[in-house]
Image (spheres, grey):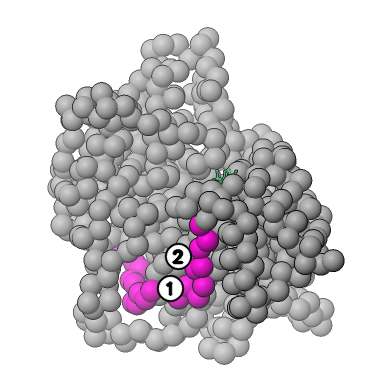
Amino acid sequence: MSKIFVYAEVVEEGIAEPSLELIGRARELADKHGFSVSAMLVGFGVRKLADELIYRGASEVHVVDNEVLSKYNLLFYTRAIVEVVENEKPDIFLFPATTTGRELAPRVAARLGTGITADCTAIEIGDYVDPITGKKYEKLLYQIRPTFGGTIMAAIVTPNHRPQMATVRPGVYSVPPRDTSRSGRIKEWTIDFSEEDVGCLEVLEVKRERRKVDLRSAKIIVSGGRGARPEGFKLIRELAELLGGEVGASRAAVDAGWISYDHQVGLTGQTVKPDIYIAVGISGAIQHVVGMKDSKIIIAINKDPEAPIFRIADYGLVGDLFVIIPKLIERLKVAKS
Amino acid sequence: MVTVNSKQNPSSERLNIVVLVKPVPDPKEPPKFKPDGTLDRLSMKLVMNPYDKYAVEAALQLREALGGIVIGVSMAPPHAIDALREALAMGVDEFILLSDPRLAGSDTLATSYALSMVVKKLWSKLGKVDLVLCGVESSDSNTAHIGPEVAEWLGLPSVSYVDKILEVSGGYVKVKKLIEGGYMVIRVKMPAVLTIAGTSYTPRIPTLRDVITARRKQITTLNADDVSIDTSKVGLLGSPTRVIKMWAAEIKRRGKIFTDTDIDRLIDNFLAELRKDGVKLK
Ligand SMILES: Cc1cc2nc3c(=O)[nH]c(=O)nc-3n(C[C@H](O)[C@H](O)[C@H](O)COP(=O)(O)OP(=O)(O)OC[C@H]3O[C@@H](n4cnc5c(N)ncnc54)[C@H](O)[C@@H]3O)c2cc1C
């Protein structure tokens, strides 16, 4: 049976959620089109996480557990994955489009000499007829993604090379339920790293905040960016409280130290879909937009009429947030009383 | 700024830096389509990929701190030359434009192969290349593949999503990399490939004089044969991936933008519109 491989990214808390989402999606596609689902687990002391992948839908887990992999190392991880792929010959290989997935997957693809599509927002299985040769292909991976800053969608296939590879955007599929009655096969690999140059690439320090606030269930989110500054965040908090919502932020605001990482929305933060998302002093960089573009209603407040955030907004208020928000708060308070 | 350890990094160790630059359709303008629904790339004005400006800035700061040379490399059709002048005006020393109709339609694997062949050529000409920098991704295709794939073709280590180059010393480069919820500090042996995120560098804006000087700088145009590219590995047919369909993304947004210098009126209009549309803020 043709195999779908899913890369199981490991974070402190266990298997990263975007990888679980992909296991879930792979399982759906596999059941419908007759594939098997295998997870690829790489690291040190990670063997114990294999069961979790089976409970979520994998029927097989390939484990490379080695001390040299205790810290993330792009070169060693690439080496380990490529060796397993060369032996197992999966038909499809999916990675989460996290910062790790998006640097590891293209390296693996280039080493294997196969194609890869980045940051897909949907994956399907379908047929394809090559318009040049007339050759018919069955059950290819349709890799669907936005391009041109989200203005165009493209569907892409990899007809002649294997595996067909893609990174898939976190949050587009949901984490599958955990079913402890599921069973599967765990295969451990021994890979010889003794020839590798250990000093070539070395992670010296990892600073990673764990998330305590979950914005995903919020109905209203008021988010602040670099334009808000610390004073603006006071206004943003006040507005959020008045509306019974939560406070969000851009990475620029988090990096500036005005608010904790818990509140960050975007590629390296959370993906949110509230009823109303109010972006205040946020320019609308693609890495922010991927985390909030599926909000039901988007309201943007920005003094720059050209800011890209206005292109995806339902309502845009052009002007100084330090003037607009106090007025808005005033008006909403009047309306309330 | 970059820390320089002068003891371990004698002035003889000047850096040869290659910056990969992609000319892209101006992100400020909406894409144009041909009647058959495919993109009309030729009618779109090309500018330098905004993300590549950060890579150019990082390269220039390194050159200023350590000495050396910054060479731009681009694979694009000939009419992209104006976009490359932007990089030269910022301070890039010279440029190589790889341009060949046989490269048209290349996907990221094929493009990275072609670019790596140019880097190899430069390598043998200069004796060494220390760093290959590029923007984290391009504004038109946003794949972030080119950096790691070029590194793979060259057999070099790479780091994607570099926020800042912290230190260059003793043949190593230390970088801060963006990750979910924070950072990683990574030390890499040079030569290495780094993709630069736009978070810590502010690209310099060329003066009129810079723009004029840039006109005298050299842009060398090479074709696939000049850099020994195996043409079966490039172009539409040499690319493993195929785009089977493209369509305009449905942006189901209302797009009601309020501009009014009278702030009370602005808020009035906005709230009235919300009421009309049946949107409740609370
Ligand atoms: C790998 C990677 C991952 C990333 N992950 C994320 C992520 O998860 N989330 C994220 O948000 N970003 C992320 N980024 C960063 C992203 O590219 C942008 O740099 C960031 O989103 C910019 O934040 P901003 O919009 O707050 O700041 P800016 O882009 O600086 O925008 C500030 C805006 O405020 C407006 N403004 C200023 N003053 C006022 C005022 N008085 N009134 C009204 N408006 C005002 C300005 O007009 C401007 O539009 C990532 C980048 C990379 C490379």
Residue type for callout 1: Ala
Q: Is residue A141 visible?
A: yes
Q: Quadrant of the C terminus of chain B?
A: bottom right
Asked where in the image residue B280 lies, by quadrant, the reply is bottom right
Residue at left offset 34%, top offset 66%: B240
Callout 2: 10 Å neighbours few (<14), some, many (20+)?
A: some
Which residue, given by chain and number where applicable, does mark 2 sit on?
A: A150
- As drawn, the residue found furthest toward the right would be A337
Percent x, y of residue B91: 32, 27
User: Could you give the CA–CA distance between mark 2 and mark 1, rounded to whole angstroms?
Assistant: 7 Å
- Read off the chain for label 1: B
Percent x, y of residue B35: 22, 77
Q: Nearer the viewer, residue B229 or B280?
A: B280
Q: In this view, does A97 lie above or below B224?
A: below
Q: Which of B115 and A281 is in front in this view?
A: A281
Q: Is residue B266 above or below residue B39?
A: above
Q: What stretch is highlighted in magenta?
A: B239-259
Asked where in the image residue B191 lies, by quadrant, the reply is top left
Residue at left offset 47%, top offset 72%: B251
Q: Nearer the viewer, residue B91 or B167?
A: B91
